[in-house]
Amino acid sequence: CGQYINTQDQLCDDTNGGPSTTDDASVVCMSNDGRNLYDAVVPTGEIFVVRTVGVSVITCEVSNEDGKLEQKVEINTSGDVELDLQDIYGSLKLKSCDEESCLVSLFYTYTMDNIGSNQMDITEISRSDDEGTK
């Protein structure tokens, strides 16, 4: 689990030399209550989706084509700990999230200076972005 780059302190164990970086892998992900969330053969570099609504921790097992376990990884999806895009959990990388999770707060700070000699009250602020003026 040399590639374990995230802020969570969850399980990541390699066995049998860890997953191949070139061969297809069998990936099985289970919820903490034992429900099967994902089970398929995944080519190296391919994106796959694990739905985790209502699940606090998932455990994913990565096996080789012969069915030998090569890696076991836990990911906390409860929202109680950070779950950030591009986090790496062993051989798995979080690429995207749905509208229920991985939301990032965005805060704007505005600084305004009255460069004129008359005192004025600010009554409206607008902000422009790619989608228009808000």
Image (cartoon, grey):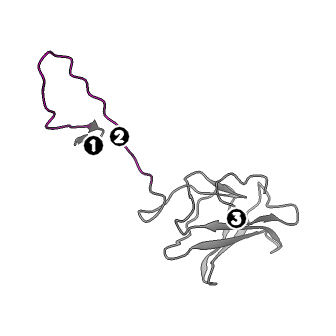
Residue designated by label 3: 10
Q: Position of residue 102 (x, y in %)?
A: 49, 58
Residue designated by label 1: 131
Disc 2 residue type?
Answer: Tyr
How far apart marks 1 and 2 lie (CA) works out to 16 Å
Quadrant of the image containing the N terminus: bottom right
> Residue at 16% across / 33% down in the picture?
122
Residues packed near mark 2 inside 10 Å, few (<14), some (14 to 19) or many (20 plus): few
* Quadrant hosting residue 39: bottom right
Disc 1 residue type?
Answer: Glu
Disc 3 residue type?
Answer: Gln
What is the magenta range? Answer: 104-127
Q: Position of residue 99 (x, y in %)?
A: 41, 62
| For marks 1 and 3 on the same chain, the one whose residue lies earlier in the sequence | 3
Residue designated by label 2: 108
For the residue pair 120 and 50, the one nearer the viewer reads as 120
